[in-house]
Image: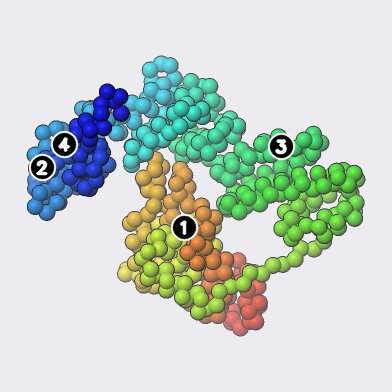
Amino acid sequence: MNASRTDEQTERWLKRTCARCGRHGWFAARWPDGHVCRTCADRAVRTRGTCPGCRQEQALPGVRFDDGVAICASCAGFVQSFDCSRCGVEGKLLGGRLCERCTLTDQLTALLDDGTDRVRPELTPLFDLLVAMEQPRSGLAWLAMRRDQPGNAAQRLRELALGQLPLTHDAFHQLQPWRAAAHLEELLMASGVLPLIDKYICSFQRWLPGHLASISDAEHVKTVRLFATWRVLPALRDRAEHSHITPGVRRNAAEQIKYATTFLHWLATRDRTLASCRQSDIDAWFTENTEHGRTRLRPFLNWAIQSRRCPRSLSLPPMKASRRAALTEDERLAALRRLLTDAEIPQILRVAGVIVLLYAQPLTRVVRLTIDDLVHDGEALFLRLGEPPSPVPEPVASLLLAHIEDRDNMNTATNKASRWLFPGRRASQPCRPDHLSALLNEIGIPVAAARGAAIRQQLLEMPAPVVADALGYHDKTTARLLNEGGAAWSRYASGDHG
């Protein structure tokens, strides 16, 4: 506040009650219907539609006095213009003359200038992607974020334009803060500037150097790096090539590295190295640690034995199979009824939960569904999970179609044409299954138990081979679940039952 201005003067000159929302505070403009605050002014100039007065498709910043319906500036009697001085599009003007998209274009042109007064040619696809984003104000907010701190988006774009930051994945994996660097890396992949790599492999490679730096013993560092290079990373790349990596797979890879590090340190406290490890040491570790620790260390020990970094005579105790309790059928139906009727639950959770409860799908597969997996056959709706597609009954069909029309995260730079049924916040990525699982658990839908109940109910109603084909399960999985339930595949007559 101006030091020479008293509180009474500030209140009298700069503050008013907003004619739109009724709040008293700083006003942004004086319009035909009265003073308006910044929030209401911005919302009004961004509103577009058909004006009920002149029937023209344009911005609707004004309101009709008798019924409060939004109308265009001309019909509302505005003296000022909201037309961009460059492109002529109506909307919010920055600096009093340029719209948000033209402002974003100018800022990106300056940041990506390679010193020749033009955008660096290699970065033109990124420039085009960002300029065309559905909500340019999101891009402006991204460029303005953390401007006073190192590693912000504007600084990274400038470094890319001048060639100070190499256009390679390895260069981005060394940057901090890593979240900001990861977002820019994903934008570069989405625009085709960088080759596509699974984001969870990128995450693992970004995490690994920091973990290795925390190990004090040089020999341990060498061993863990070899394990990561020749066992963990190849397994991740193979998984990405044939399927897709989930957050759980990425987390498991990091835990294998952590437990390998812990085991080497534990051996050192017993005056042992990996080469001098004995069967008694293996037995002691498996006795002292939980089942989780034993499972996560097993890949490292198998690799060490196979590569002869420890005696090949060592043997590992057998793994124990674990089973999770499923919901009862009454509990499953109650949860399904709640998701279908409770409008207070966010729609994304209702749709995801219903797919789990009806079709026994893991969330890792649910988030990979696209709107193309919903198949219309006349008035009937089918969900393609396997072959043939599964019918979607009412009211589930109406819920799915309503969700498609109002999906979350559709305003980001790369999501405006997203085909994901559950678009994520990151560039061209679906929603994270672990995040969705946590939200469903918060509203009382235990995902693992719900899925178990759904698949067992399906096996009670249909032969196991039909369930396996329709829901995308492996036949061995449905056979095992059927045997656990006291039935067998022998009750299903083979042959064509079409």
Task: Identify the residue shown where x is 46% and y is 43%.
Answer: 427
* Image mark for residue 76: 2
Mark 4 and mark 1 lie on one chain; the one further toward the N terminus is 4
The 10 Å Cα crowd at callout 1, few under 14, some 14 to 19, many 20 or more, is many
Q: Which residue is mark 1?
A: 369
Q: Of tags 3 and 4, which is closer to the observer?
A: 4
Residue type pointed to by label 4: Arg
* Image mark for residue 326: none
Residue at disc 3, secondary structure: loop
In the image, is residue 455 above or below residue 176? below
* Image mark for residue 214: 3
Look at the numbered discs 2 and 4 and tell me whether their residues touch, using CB distance below 8 Å.
Answer: no
Residue at disc 1, secondary structure: loop
Mark 1 and mark 2 lie on one chain; the one further toward the N terminus is 2
Look at the numbered discs 3 and 2 and tell me whether their residues touch, using CB distance below 8 Å.
Answer: no
Q: How is the image coloured?
A: rainbow
